[in-house]
Image (tube, helix red, strand yellow):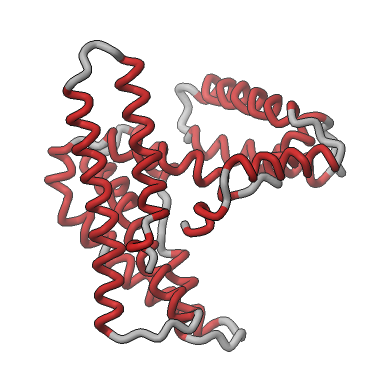
Amino acid sequence: MESIVLTTPFRVLEESTSSSESSGSDPTNAVIFVGISLLLGIACRHVLRGTRVPYSVALLVLGIGIGSLEYGTHHGLGRIGDGIRIWANIDPDLLLAVFLPALLFESAFSMEVHQIKRCAVQMILLAGPGVLISTFCLGSALKLAFPYNWSWQTSLLLGGLLSATDPVAVVALLKELGASKKLGTIIEGESLMNDGTAIVVYQLLLRMVTGWAFNWGAVIKFLVQVSLGAVGVGLAFGIASVLWLGFIFNDTVIEITLTLTVSYVAYFTVCTLPILHT
């Protein structure tokens, strides 16, 4: 999260462009690869229509196959392979900053309020105590199984990173199979909430690993600032955007732009507020 603040998209784009130019790569190949990928995705979905093969799984297999052809045949895909390598070398913080706010907002916006109310208890249990139990179990397994002589803090740190699940393929598969709406809401809602829990656990353990002198009062203060502070920022931006939209009538351009902009502004505000990172 903090590295996003230190890395601006313009600087990353300039560095990635200069590195691609210095290596003889054509930046337009990256766009060509995106276009071909979309065409392959459309063709894959059309071919699999009416079959029992999950579309998301087929896309995963297709992507692995294309990557294997490129990296296993010594740049044998030509301009497509060049586009693959450009995307593979792009700064991950840039991809995170561009796609994550919109994806989180879309996932939260598409959920039904009455379903969330029905499943709130299950989601909180899975995203709160469930993530903590998973962090402890994974950290203990890493500490006892790996011969690296890691400290407990380091093992739990990696366990916290691995505890944040992302069931995008699972949710898509449930929708395709017509599974219970309640089950899909629990899985998707838990995924949204466990990201926040995992980030808080990660930041706390990272400070412990880096030698942060703490006591229980400091730990409680940190948890309250990070968790409640982020929720407060989200509520503030949500209320402000709803009030603003109330003054707009029949102007879809402003409504869509404002809705999308608020998701990014709220995300980067949470990332940059000092009170949420001290």
Q: Position of residue 176 (x, y in %)?
A: 37, 31
Q: Is residue 26 above or below residue 107?
A: above
Toward which corner of the image does residue 175 lie, by quadrant? top left
Q: Residue at the location (85% across, 42% down)?
A: 23
Q: Can the viewer see residue 176 in this picture?
A: no
Toward which corner of the image does residue 103 lie, by quadrant? top left
Count of picture labels: 0
Q: Is residue 181 above or below residue 214?
A: above
Q: Position of residue 97 (x, y in %)?
A: 50, 44
Which residue is more in the foreground, 158 or 258?
258
Q: Residue at the location (82% across, 35% down)?
A: 25
Indicate left or right for 65 with 45 as reference: right
Q: Can the viewer see residue 112 in this picture?
A: yes
Residue that sits furthest to the top in the current view: 250
Q: Residue at the location (33% across, 63% down)?
A: 275
Which residue is more in the foreground, 236 or 39?
236
Indicate left or right for 6 with 225 as reference: right
Image quarter where the C terminus lies is: bottom left
Q: Residue at the location (64% across, 39% down)?
A: 63
Q: Position of residue 256 (x, y in %)?
A: 34, 22
Residue that sits furthest to the front in the current view: 274
Indicate left or right for 178 with 146 as reference: left
Q: Is residue 152 above or below residue 40?
A: below
Q: Position of residue 99 (x, y in %)?
A: 48, 39
Q: Is residue 211 above or below residue 41?
A: below
